[in-house]
Image (cartoon, coloured by chain):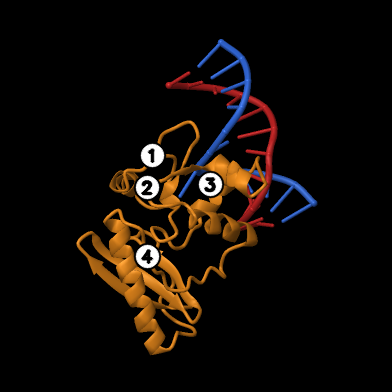
Chain colours: A orange, B red, C blue
DNA sequence: CCCTAGCGGTGCT
DNA sequence: AGCACCGCTAGGG
């Protein structure tokens, strides 16, 4: 239930999904799982154009290793309460920094839920702009990724992440 | 390095 | 209600 708009960049064609409430999804180029085609209620055209402009600019900046800047409204209504709490914390991780799954869990006052945090990161429908790539295992290494793992590595290198 | 046990959210049945 | 699946972690070889 959204309208799907492509974003063509040198890295490939990303697909942005918009509901009447905002950006609700971002697909990687050549994403394996095609979401449902656009149907259902759509945002009015003027705001869609504004939102999409903001999405494209933010995406370009993140892909350059810079802070995303202004984002369109994000529609995370498809997420569970726990997932939304995790995603909110992801948005607080500055460019160039990382957090561990356990750190996120501790901030949420559920210190034993590190694994569940990993699940929630994997369910993030808006990668790059909701920076799930900045979450890593406390033992070191990259951890997992829902998109291509090479992207996680590349993004962290771009941001000179510690 | 490996293995194992414990963990909590989620989705399926 | 049960159960298997995980982007995890801590502890022990």
Query: Is A48 drawn above or below residue B10 in the view shown?
Result: below
Lower sequence index among marks 3 and 4: 4
- Label 3: chain letter: A
For the question of whether residue A29 can be seen, the reply is: no
Distance, label 2 to label 3, CA atoms, is 20 Å
Q: Are marks 2 and 1 in contact (CB under 8 Å)?
A: yes
Co-location on one chain, circles 2 and 4: yes
Q: Identify residue for label 1.
A: A162
Q: Residue visible at 58% across and 43% down?
A: A115
Q: Which residue is mark 2?
A: A96
Mark-to-mark CA distance, 2 and 4: 14 Å
Quick check: A147 above or below A20? above
Q: Are marks 3 and 1 on the same chain?
A: yes
Q: Disc 2 on helix, strand or loop?
A: loop
Indicate which disc, 1 or 4, sits on the residue closer to the N terminus: 4
Question: Which disc number belongs to residue A69?
Answer: 4
Output the chain of dot 1: A
Chain bearing mark 4: A
Q: Mark 3 — residue?
A: A118
């Amino acid at each position: 239930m959204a309208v799907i708009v492509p974003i063509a960049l040198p890295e490939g064609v990303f697909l942005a999904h918009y509901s009447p409430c905002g950006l609700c999804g971002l697909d990687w180029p050549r994403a394996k799982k095609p979401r449902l085609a656009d149907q259902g209620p759509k945002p009015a055209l003027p705001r869609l154009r504004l939102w999409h402009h903001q999405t494209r600019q933010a995406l370009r900046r993140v892909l350059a290793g810079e802070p995303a800047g202004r984002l369109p409204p994000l529609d995370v209504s498809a997420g569970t309460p726990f997932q939304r709490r995790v995603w909110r914390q992801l948005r607080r991780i500055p460019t160039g920094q990382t957090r561990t799954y356990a750190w996120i869990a501790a901030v949420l006052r559920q210190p034993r839920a590190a694994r569940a945090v990993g699940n929630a990161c994997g369910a993030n429908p808006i990668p790059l702009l909701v920076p799930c790539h900045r979450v890593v295992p406390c033992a070191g290494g990259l951890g997992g990724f829902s998109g291509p793992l090479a992207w996680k590595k590349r993004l962290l290198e771009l941001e000179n992440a510690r």
